[in-house]
Image: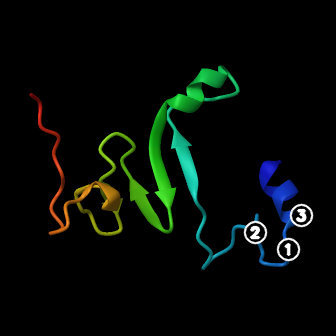
């Protein structure tokens, strides 16, 4: 329902349609949110820009597996992950 409604209001870019060759961003759940709305927090995978992510580690699982390094804004100027120091 949400997809077709978005498609009806799209500005001609084809938003809301899923066809071969198109990329859809979505969240795959372990549990049915119609049974309990809290099940929307029971996330199995996140699919964004054609890549499948583990929602806990943020590692890319598919199409080419790679470990999550750090958010770009959490890196030092030399590109390494910044760590917090405890006093």
Give the residue at x 29% y 44%: 57
In front of the other: label 1 or label 2?
1
Image quadrant occupied by the C terminus: top left
Q: Which of 12 and 82 is in front in this view?
A: 82
Residue at the extreme front: 87
Mark yes or no: residue 71 visible. no
Q: Which of 87 and 3 is in front in this view?
A: 87
Drawn side of residue 44 relative to residue 25, left or right? left
Residue wearing tag 3: 9
Secondary structure under the numbered disc 3 in the rendered image: helix
Question: What label does residue 11 carry, if any?
Answer: 1
The image quarter containing residue 8 is: bottom right
Residue at the extreme left: 87
Give the residue at x 50% y 68%: 49
Drawn side of residue 51 relative to residue 8, left or right? left
Give the residue at x 44% y 40%: 44
Drawn side of residue 67 relative to residue 53, left or right? left
Residue wearing tag 2: 15
């Amino acid at each position: 329902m949400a997809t077709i409604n978005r498609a009806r209001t799209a500005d001609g870019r084809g938003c809301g349609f899923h066809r071969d060759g198109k990329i859809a961003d979505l969240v795959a759940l372990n549990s049915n949110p119609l049974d309990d709305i809290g099940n929307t927090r029971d996330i199995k995978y996140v699919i964004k820009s054609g890549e499948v992510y583990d929602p806990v580690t943020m590692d890319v699982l598919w199409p080419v597996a790679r470990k999550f390094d750090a958010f770009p804004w959490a890196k030092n100027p030399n590109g390494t992950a910044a760590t917090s120091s405890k006093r």
